[in-house]
Image (spheres, grey):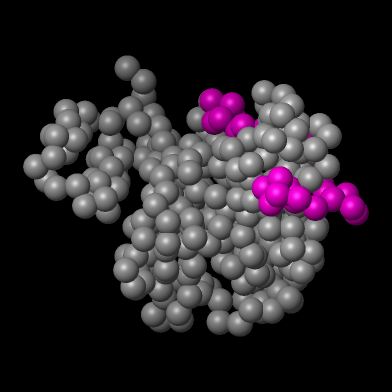
Amino acid sequence: MEELDTAQLSARGSGEEFYREWERVLTSLSIPESHAIRHALQQYHFRRARAHLVASWPITSVARGWHDIEQAGLGRLGRVARTVCPNAPVPGMRIEAQGSSLASYDRRWLEHFYLVACGYSPSKVVPIASKRAEHASPEFTRVTGSSNWPAIQVLFPTQSYVEHVSVEGSMGGGCFFGKPEEFRKRGLRCLYAQPVSSRGHLLMHAKSLLVTNHDNSCGYVYLGSHNFTRAAWGTISGTQAQPTQSLSNWELGIVLPLTEYDAWDAIPYNRHIEPYGADDIPWDASNLLI
């Protein structure tokens, strides 16, 4: 029988936690206690579960307080991150976010996402009090020691790649929405990079996050349905005394700690990532209408 030390058990989670998260997902879908799937779930102990569930569901108003915030969306991801990497050095962490649909990003949302997803204790600095701006918030600079953009790479195919390199060409890009106008307006070129699927030059509809430190000794992989958007992950706001989180989408995914031997194999793209060139813009399905 496989023996695990306390740290490994913490990173892996427990069968009870996995079962409890499944129950929360079913409850969010308004599935009654008498439903057959509830009874079927009780037949499994999940003691060998190596992943952590992360779900999002629409919230009628907002989740209030960290206890409720950490049940879903970005709040839940942050809770898992602190379990997987309890001693993660936030200033040394980086994120690669891969998906099929982009959002209108602003600096504060990116700072929030970075701090929470990298496992920083949110109650110490989140929500950031500073309003939306093009410069780093004092809180972010204090925590990370940097006034640069958060260490996030947004992985999304360029128009040139879709049209001239991808296997299916433009006709394969009908489900990819890159918001090129927002890209031009926001000036975020330095955060964008072109991913290449581990299966060749196929466009990836997969959604993933890779969160790791400089030597890859700590971190995790997320795989699921969440795009890198506010609608999917939510928005944390309010004050440190009264934080809130809003969520719009139904989403579901898993987090695998990088300590798992096969976690790196779950990443759907090649790790050599090419930053956007000076003339690159994100592909958008609207190009098919031209």
Query: Would residue 249 appear left or right of 132 to someone viewing this image?
Result: left
Residue 54 image offset from top left, x and y in percent: 41, 47
Depicted 126 relative to depicted 28: above or below: below
Question: Is residue 237 on the magenta stretch?
Answer: no
Q: Name the one closer to the observer, 254 or 83.
A: 254
Q: Name the one closer to the observer, 44 or 174.
A: 174
Query: Would residue 235 appear left or right of 200 to someone viewing this image?
Result: left
Please provide the residue range marked out in magenta: 262-290
Residue 51 image offset from top left, x and y in percent: 41, 36
Q: Name the one closer to the observer, 119 or 226.
A: 226
Query: Would residue 18 appear left or right of 34 to someone viewing this image?
Result: right
Q: Quadrant of residue 98?
A: top right
Q: Residue at x 51, y 39 (%)?
A: 223
Q: Quadrant of residue 118?
A: bottom right
Residue found at the very far right of the displayed protein = 278
Depicted 283 relative to depicted 242: above or below: above
